[in-house]
Structure formats: C-alpha cells, structure tokens
Image (cartoon, grey):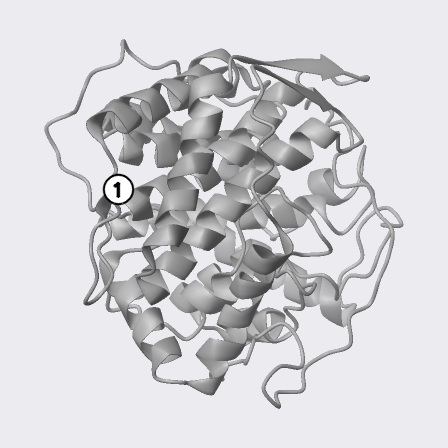
C-alpha cells in the first residue's frame, strides 16, 4: 500500500521529522574510467536558433501548472507546503548574490573552491529566488534573478582547473548549467497568478544562450566516458540546455547520453557498486547518479516522453530499490562506504517518488532530511527544494 511521506526537511510549523545526522564525506572524489565499457559521446550539430518541434515552457523540472499549484497551496496556508517553502526562504534569506562575476572560474577535484561556491551558489540562489517570485509575484525577486543570470552570462569565459582531476571543469559545468537553466526558464516564461511577467529581454536571452553554449561546447561535451554520475550529469545538463534554447538536437543528444549510461551505472539487480565503491567508497556518489537520472526523467516527462523512467527494464526504479535494500541492510556493497546510508538523502528521490510512488520510493522519501537551507549537508551540486516543488504534487500535470 502506498503512503505519502511528509518530507518537509525539519521541525517546522509543528511538524516533527527526523534528527539530522552529521557525517564527513568527500563530495567530489576523482572518478575512475571503466576499463571494459564506454558510452557514446554525442557532439552537437552547428547551433540552430530553434528546431521544428516545440517544447513545453517552462519545462525544466517545473511547469506553469506545478508552479501555480504549489504557490496556491502555500499562499492558502497549507501547512505542509508552507513548511517545505520555508527552506526556499531560508536559502534566499541566508544568501546574497556573490557579485563575484568572473571571466575565469577556478575549480578543483576533491575540494570546493571559493569560485565554485560563488558560481554554483549563485545558480542555486537564482533558482530559489525564481521560486520565491513564482509564489509571491514580487518583482524585486525576479529582478535579482536576472541580475545574477546577466552577471555570469556577461562575464564568464572559462574554467581553470587545479588539483589532480584535469577534467573537473566538465563536471562543474554539468552541475551548474541546468540549475541556471531552471531559473531562467521560470523568469522567461512564467507569469505569477495575478502578477506580471519578469521582463526577460531578447538581448538577455541571447547573452544567456551564449553563456550556456560556452559551457556545453567547451566542457559538457568533453566529459570523459567514466560511465558514472559525470555522464549522467552531462546528459541531464544537455537536456536542460536544449529545452531552454529550443534545440531538439541538443536535447536529444542529452537524452541519448542518459539512456546510454543508465544501464552502465545501475546494474540489472539495481546495484551501483561502481558509484559506491572504487574511488568513492561513500553513500553520496551513487545518489548523484540517481538524482541526475530522476531529473532527466522528469524533464523528459514534461516534454511528453516517459521512456527514461521505464528504460532498460525500469532500471532507475531498480536503482532506488537497491537504495531501499541498502537502508535496510539486506544488501552489502563490496567495500566499506563512509557516511550514513540513511542520511542525507538526495532530493532526486522526491521527483522519482512522484512518478513511481512505490513502497520502496515512499520509504526513501520519508527519510529525506536536509539542512536549514534545504540542501543535503550543504552540497551545492544539484538544485534542491523538490520537497516544495514535487512532493505530493499531482502527476496529472
């Protein structure tokens, strides 16, 4: 029997959930390429302004209908939705635009640099503020989002890499690009109920598309065939960029990357030992893959294609079933992972559970706990707040 977990990430508005357990782990350890399997990398054709088949907009994780739905619930004082929205507010109130818009962003493997915090933190802030604007209609929030997007789009030129992983920039671009895209999609296309459009201009759009194409052409397209969360993130990023740019070519290349890597990351029995063990040995990296795959499946679903959810024999669901078994101790990975298998849980589960709604995905979702800013232990890799935007939101839209 299905049950609907309350995943509001903390004790808010009288809702008592779970005690946050802290543990140390490395969120960006060097990946190791597989010796016997590879995925096919797809290079984009010369950029075209738009392809013939139209996309649903906004169409990156959120739609007009879902944004309307959660805003209406929160504005009507629905306790659960307001409690989830509080984490959007917390991030907005605890962070300001970095104003550190730089031509060259320094990144490194194994550590998070100040430039990464500014770059990906601003991507998250732009998305959180876009959600805040969608709920309230307050124009100043949209203005700040556009200032952030304009700031990075007008300054960024390249990544520089330090440390032992020379390909780190490909991963950083794959993480940041879809979050920037999700914010821009809301600002460009959404109009709050009873409010006004944000006023995204043609010049801003062109500048932002050039920013995305720089990351795509020079970094995301060059991600090595590690057959792990790197390639998942790159495929998800290209899908998001394709939607924003109305390019079926870029979008379909992203879908191809995701569907190719899916059965390489998740084995037929659901195990993800290449992500849990090897160079990682933690309970974090396999959740990167599950989250990236869930986000990719969701945005494809918005565009009318549910095939990623069922691809390779519903391999994504099989992966979450493996996580469920890990949490119950009924399977044991061939290493001794660091951290706690039950905490933190990455936000992709709330997206996947919205579609699958099984006993296993409900159980994992019920253990979703985040920090006060709505992030899994402060990790800035993937956009968050899916407890606000996806949990208990009807799948009919």
Residue reaching furthest to the bottom = 14
Q: Position of residue 225 (x, y in %)?
A: 58, 20
| Vertical comparison of 177 with 342: above or below | above
Apparent side of residue 55 relative to residue 9 in the rendered image (left or right): left
Res. 311 visible in picture: no
Residue 83 visible in this rendered orientation of the protein: yes
Secondary element at image label 1: helix
Quadrant of the rendered image containing residue 362 = bottom right
Q: Quadrant of the C terminus?
A: bottom left
- Looking at the picture, how far across and down is residue 104, in whole percent? 61, 14
Check the image and name the residue furthest to the left: 52
For image coordinates 80% across by 47% down, the residue present is: 282
Residue 35: x and y in percent read 69, 19
Image coordinates of residue 20 in percent, x first then y, are: 78, 70
Residue 265 image-quadrant placement: top right
Q: Is residue 3 above or below residue 111?
A: below
Judge from the rendering whether residue 46 lies leftward or rightward of residue 387; answer left or right.
Answer: left
Q: Residue at x 47, y 86 (%)?
A: 79
Tell which of 211 and 192 is nearer to you.
192
Instruction: Out of 146 and 73, give the one closest to the viewer.
Output: 146
Of 203 and 14, the residue lying toward us: 203
- Residue situated furthest top in the rendering: 46
| Residue bearing mark 1 | 188
């Amino acid at each position: 029997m299905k049950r609907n977990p309350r995943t509001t990430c903390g004790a808010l508005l009288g809702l008592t959930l779970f005690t946050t357990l802290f543990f140390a782990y490395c969120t960006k350890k060097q990946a190791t390429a597989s010796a016997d399997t590879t995925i096919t990398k797809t290079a984009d054709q010369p950029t075209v302004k738009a392809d013939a088949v139209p996309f649903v907009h906004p169409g990156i994780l959120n739609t007009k209908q879902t944004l309307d739905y959660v805003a209406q619930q929160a504005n009507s004082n629905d306790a659960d939705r307001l409690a989830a929205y509080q984490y959007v507010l917390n991030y907005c109130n605890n962070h300001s635009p970095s104003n550190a818009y730089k031509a060259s962003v320094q990144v490194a493997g194994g550590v998070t640099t100040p430039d990464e915090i500014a770059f990906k933190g601003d991507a998250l802030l732009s998305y959180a503020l876009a959600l805040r604007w969608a709920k309230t209609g307050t124009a100043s929030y949209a203005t700040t989002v556009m200032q952030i997007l304009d700031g990075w789009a007008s300054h960024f030129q390249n990544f520089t890499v330090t440390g032992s992983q020379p390909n780190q920039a490909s991963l950083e671009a794959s993480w940041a690009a879809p979050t920037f895209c999700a914010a821009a999609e809301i600002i460009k296309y959404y109009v709050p109920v009873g409010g006004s459009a944000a006023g995204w201009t043609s010049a801003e759009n062109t500048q932002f598309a050039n920013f995305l194409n720089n990351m795509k052409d020079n970094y995301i397209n060059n991600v090595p065939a590690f057959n792990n969360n790197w390639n998942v993130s790159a495929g998800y990023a290209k899908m998001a960029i394709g939607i924003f740019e109305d390019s079926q070519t870029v979008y379909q290349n992203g879908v191809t990357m995701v569907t190719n890597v899916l059965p390489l990351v998740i084995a037929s029995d659901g195990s993800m030992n290449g992500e849990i063990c090897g160079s990682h040995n933690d309970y974090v990296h396999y959740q990167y893959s599950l989250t990236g795959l869930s986000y990719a499946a969701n945005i494809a679903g918005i565009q009318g294609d549910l095939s990623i959810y069922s691809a390779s024999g519903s391999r994504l669901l099989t992966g979450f079933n493996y996580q469920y078994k890990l949490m119950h101790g009924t399977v044991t990975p061939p290493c001794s992972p660091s951290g706690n298998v039950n905490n933190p849980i990455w936000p992709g589960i709330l997206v996947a559970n919205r579609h699958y709604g099984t006993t296993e995905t409900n159980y994992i979702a019920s253990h979703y706990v985040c920090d006060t800013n709505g992030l899994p232990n402060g990790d800035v890799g993937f956009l968050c707040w899916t407890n606000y935007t996806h949990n208990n939101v009807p799948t009919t839209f």
